[in-house]
Image (tube, coloured by chain):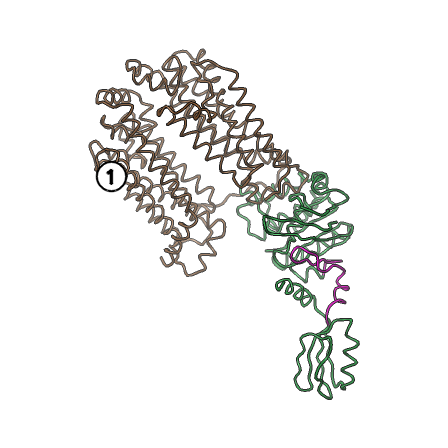
Amino acid sequence: MTGTWHLIRLILRRDRVLLPLWLIILAALPASYAASYAELLPDDAARHQYAVTTAGTPSFESLLGPLFGDSTGALTAQRVGTVYAILALISLLTVIRHTRTEEDAGRRELIAATVVGRHAALSAALIVVTAANLLLALLITVTLAGSGLPAGGSLLLGLSMAVTGIVFAAVGALTAQLTENAGPARGLAIIVLGGAFLIRAAGDPADSWLSWLSPLAWGQQAQPYADEKWWALALPLALAAVLAAAAYRISVGRDVGAGVLPARLGPAGSASLASPFALAWRLQRGLLLGWSAGLGVAGLAVGGTASAVMDAFADNPQLADIMARLGGGASLADAFVAGLLGIMAIAVSAYGIQAALRMRAEETGLRAEPVLATATGRVPWALSHVLFAVLGPAVALLVLGVTLGISYGVSMGDVGGQLPRVIGAALVQLPAVAVLTGLSVALFGLLPRLSALAWGALGAFLLLGQIGAILQLDPLVLDVSPFTHTPRLPGGTLAATPVLTLSLIAALLIAAGLYGFRRRDIG
Amino acid sequence: MVSGLHKSFGRTHALNGLDLTVGTGEVHGFLGPNGSGKSTTIRVLLGLLKADAGTARLLGGDPWNDATALHRRLAYVPGDVTLWPNLSGGEVIDLLGRLRGGLNTRRRAELLERFDLDPRKKGRAYSKGNRQKVGLVAALASDVELLILDEPTSGLDPLMEEVFRECVQEEKRRGRTVLLSSHILAEVEQLCDRVSIIRNGQTVETGTLTDLRHLSRTSITADLASPVADLPDVHDLHVDGTRVRFQVDAEHLDAVLKHLSHAGVRSLVSQPPTLEELFKRHYETAARS
């Protein structure tokens, strides 16, 4: 364990921006949910109605988790269901980034040759992530209790999140020992997280024992603000201890740089890799397939519940009003689908940004240089990535439209009628998504060092969309977000002007980015 | 090839009026201490960076405006070859070769054999030396007029270093031009027709190795019959009774020898300047300035 303290300081120094940032965001979310529930559902009757409705809507429980009780606290504890998954993801990625990524890059060797124990790197990463999770629990407890919720329940909610983060930090620690490289380690850990999410999503609506098999479910099964089961926190802690012990065991027994699972060989050559486009396909296809598959599954899962939502919400004008404000359409079911697509559009934009900023990653990783030193021009090189950043989201939205349309159509008993409507409604999201892609390309070409600002813009638009409608902000402020201008489909009217304007803005941003990229220095 | 080149990054002046001329068909050594501007010059020549001032001509074209056309006629190996983690070495060789406009498959196979490289490994699995080999095979298997090599042998073992030298000599026999940036003096001595030494973004010396040697100092150790108090125009003079040790520039050699014979020479050992001393001298002045 010698040297662990120094490595902890190294991690804190390297993550001095990232770590506080995600702590603040994740700490703010539960309190903001609690505040919006308190405002939207001020009295017991409204909350009770909402709770009954939710209990009758399996997709809600699939997506968010089980609802125990009808207090504001209990509603908040359900609503934060996705935050558990986000926290789990951040925790496992952070551990892998400070263990296997370091080793993969060869920096671990530099450290390992100094007076540093064999366990130090793994310990430092686990200690930092565990401490961060506990700090998060404290912040959540303080903000929730400060907003008037019971202190005991707030502490349990905070701790239930922290232990979930800690379990998945241990998952990351273990997969980081298994593979030789960081990419597969991340993939493996994310598969575990995805599996845990699916098991929970399948188990929760049925109130089945299945949920107890998922580490992601344990936090909510502690039932903060309801039948508080503090002992449920012991489960994730025990699993985390087992996983971490396994990680240490492997870590001690293996060589620095080696993994347990063998690295696979590739082909000895390739006849098809002969153009910048072919290279971009190789680099982008994983993203494209992953996003398309993920959105396809999401579409299937939620589309089927639209009619149930309609039934349940029909006799509650207040909730109907909320949905209408989010979705803005005529029929309630349509409004539900439109609202859903609006949220999906934000997710697809993340894909667009990711695909566009791959160019920056290629540049800073010095992999763009050898390609641009061949007869490949800068614009063709950039365009082959931009193509994926624009058309990739289009494909993903199309897949989403098809699966959502089919499942929605089936639940409404009208596939033939609903499928084209929903596909159209999904594709109409594309211009706003393309604006974010365009912004990323423009930043990459003109202000490459600030490329990551595209993520900041997406975060700001997300907040405007989520909180803006509820807080009833000035329309001028809401207009900044391209998503405000997307026609609310299905159900609303398709206005050509905003669609065309957004498309034009996206095209101009891309053109500006390419113009800048032709003229600037590489590197 | 390049004259009066300037390039700044923020407040750092990387290139400060650099001149470099590489003749067709020659192997030109490009030397200088770390951070002296070698890689920046090469990246300007590749059209990756735009020079702030000065002119650069490459194979008769402008490296910035005619980049794509010129790149068909050259191959480049960076000092630190980075590969795509999920592409195999063979795929990268084929990709870069094809993007350049073609690859000699027979030569590709021969080079893989000579460099003892397994092309099936993924980019992430290669060691530093093997990544360099991927870059070298991709460049050497292309039919191009000019090779731009930026410290290409970093990380190669001595046997592979030898293979690299053979390959460069073959390329030279084929009439290709090579710009070789290197710190390995034996490599430079064996391969290069001419060398340019730069420091702080300026060219300080250029010419054939013989020219440079001529410009440089000879080390002399002598036993004299009577002690000498002082010798004009010598460097690093050590006097120990009748024994003297010093270095002298070529143009003063004759005058100094006359001085010595005046004092009476019992024995005299003269050493021609080694390349190492030559470069050290240039590098040290770079460090001091």
**Residue identifier under label 1:** A155
Instruction: Identify the colour of chain B in the image.
Output: green
For the record, the magenta segment spans B190-217
Which quadrant, please, contains the N terminus of chain A?
Answer: bottom left
- Under tag 1, what secondary structure? helix
Furthest-left residue in this view: A227
Q: From the viewer's perspective, is B27 left or right of A478?
A: right
* Total labels drawn: 1
Query: Residue A177: x percent and y percent?
Result: 41, 48
Furthest-bottom residue in this view: B226
User: Residue placed at 31% from the left, 21% from the top?
Assistant: A57
Query: Residue A29: x percent and y percent?
Result: 34, 34
Mark 1 surroundings within 10 Å by alpha-carbon count, few (fewer than 14), some (14 through 19), many (20 or more): many
Chain coloured brown: A
Q: Is residue B232 above or below residue A63?
A: below
User: Residue placed at 33% from the left, 36% from the top?
Assistant: A28
